[in-house]
Amino acid sequence: MRLRVAPEVLPVAVPFLCLQPLVENAVRHGLQDRSEPGLITIVAEDAGADCVINVEDDGVGMDPEDVRRLLSGGDRPLADEAAGIGLANVDDRLRQVYGDEYGLAVETGPAPGRR
């Protein structure tokens, strides 16, 4: 695991149970099907008036359309149900605390090593 946090964002309070589910999702759903060890990287950076936190893994990836459905509350593929609940909950929590202009942005693809 790699962790890089900009000093200027250290005092930023993150809503309860927003980061942990993303890291757990990266481990359980991103890395579990790899035949070799994987890497999770967490980066927190200053973005003007905002703090941007990225959780990346070099795992198996996921179909972007499935992610869109998960975050929009649509039907979930059974294998991704746990991932979808965690992602949707974090997205909802961020939007409740900070407003609809904030939330998760998921970048993925259905190929190994995609982030």
Image (cartoon, rainbow, N blue to C red):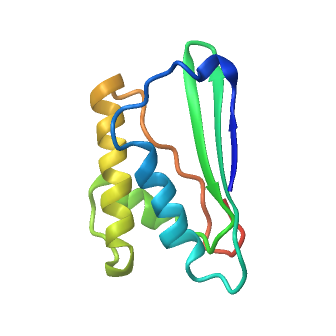
Q: Could you say which quadrant of the image residue 90 lies in?
A: top left
Q: Residue 31: x, y in percent? A: 59, 73
Above/below status of 94 relative to 56: above
Please indicate, yes or no, whether residue 104 appears anywhere in the rendered image: yes
Q: Residue at x 37, y 80 (%)?
A: 79
Against 63, is 19 above or below? above
Q: Is residue 59 above or below residue 41?
A: below
Name the outermost residue toward the bottom. Answer: 35
Q: Quadrant of the C terminus?
A: bottom right
Rendered residue at 43%/30% (across/down) = 14
Residue 58 image point, x, y percent: 69, 65
Q: Which of the pair 97/27 is nearer the observer?
A: 27
Q: How many callouts does the rendering have? A: 0
Answer with the quarter of the image where residue 75 lies.
bottom left
> Where does the image place residue 57, in percent across and percent down from the top left?
64, 61
Residue drawn at point x = 42 percent, y = 37 percent: 103
Looking at the rendering, in which quadrant would you find the N terminus? Answer: bottom right
Judge from the rendering whether residue 80 lies leftward or rightward of residue 25; answer left or right. Answer: left
